[in-house]
Image: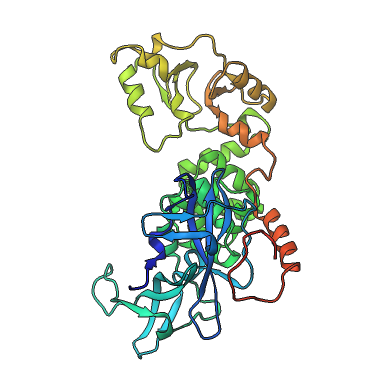
Amino acid sequence: MSAVRIFVARLVGRTVFDPLGDRLGKVRDLVVVYRNTESPQVVGLVLEIPGKKRVFLSIGRITSITSGQIISTGLINVRRFEQRTSETRIIAEMLGRKVVLADGGGEATIEDVAIEEIGPGEWEVAQLFVRKPKLGGGPFAKGPTAFVAWNDVRERQTQGDPQSAAQLIASFSDLKPADLANTLLDLPDKRMQEVASELPDERLADVLEEMPETEQVRILARLGDERAADVLDAMQPDDAADLIAQLPEERGETLLDLMQPEEADDVRRLLEYAPDTAGGLMTPEPIILSADATVAEGLALIRRHELAPALGAAVCVTLPPYEPPTGRFLGMVHFQRMLRYPPHERLGTLVDQSLDPVRVDAPASEVTRILASYNLVSVPVVDASNRLLGVVTIDDVLDHLLPDDWRGGRSSRIVRSRAAAARRTPTVLTRRADDGTS
């Protein structure tokens, strides 16, 4: 009977089940160790369990692997995964590496890795799917591909030469921004920067919004000014303002000058307010309509895919102009109220008269009290002339109230990793135990 061979990219995102069919988590990576003259040996999986926590699952606890599902013994240690110096993650670190073909075929890039079962509970890297440099053609042409055995290549990674992150990014395309942010924070510094440099501007902007400010600054510091400005353009103005406020003043001004004028104006306006006030917390891009606009128009705007749920919970009604700072603020119309009226009903007749806006200089504590007291997801912010400047949403307040390290930033992970490194024993090229000890 032929050996079972599975390509790793097909395993990412697959569910791991226990013997009774209950879901344990999803595969996010495979961990291997190198052996002197043999193929790398699989020692376990990086599993994402409920709570978005990543844990290590020893290969010895896997009873069956197919491209569709994975069955384990059901025993999992929920201690957070910490990578050892002797270990390599296939998805995060091996894909995109350069190899030299032993048959004289030149250099190629690893795009996928096949693992093979060589015995009960024993898996090793058996084959690579590689792509050679393109031989010409148009700008979208790709080089030829080939399947090669591990023993028929040798790795080649020149010092300082960036490793392609395209395959890694494709593997994590299904992750939400917050989950991708956590994934990047788990990568080595160099690899994290390689991935960040290849993410599209909009995707990187979404990911940065979910990272601790210290990590945002680290990543932005390694981007060129033009690229950094493009990413800031794609961020929500309040998040961009928070990030720029952490940068040296000179670079902050440089990036603001390079941003799109409209986006830069929003950010500059937010930077004028103290961070613990309604003005410092607000989002300056609410949905704003006139009193003559209809329910149909309001519902059409809140259906936009790119709109955050909290911003889509209500529309603001003002006098002209309809860009902040607007004309006199008239009130808000919640989407549930719009659903109760015919499409032609005018929004001016549906304004919630019981909800008062907050002043731009109101303390964050007052904004929090209003949101909690009236079970709101957003509250309008006005200036002394009752002109609408923006809205504070519930997620803005939560970001302010939660401790600085609520996202599980890299700083605490580095401390844990260094402590673990101090306990490491000499490298053992056998299956890793998953009891969390070294």
Residue 28: x and y, percent?
A: 49, 56
Q: Name which quarter of the figure residue 363 lies in.
A: top right
Spot the residue most to the bottom.
104
**Residue in the foreground of this view, choosing between 181 and 298:** 181
What residue do we see at 65% from left, 35% from top? 400
Spot the residue most to the left.
137
Residue 257 in sight: no
In the rendered image of this protein, does residue 125 appear above or below residue 341? Answer: below
Residue 294: x and y, percent?
A: 32, 17
In the rendered image of this protein, does residue 362 appear above or below residue 239? Answer: above
Residue 91: x and y, percent?
A: 47, 64
Say how the picture is coloured. Answer: rainbow
What residue do we see at 67% from left, 22% from top? 366
Q: Quadrant of the C terminus?
A: bottom right
What residue do we see at 37% from left, 69% from top? 5
What residue do we see at 41% from left, 50% from top? 174
Residue 92: x and y, percent?
A: 50, 64
Q: Name which quarter of the figure residue 9 lies in.
A: bottom left
Residue 140 in sight: yes
**Residue in the foreground of this view, choosing between 19 and 164:** 19
- Count of marks, rendered view: 0
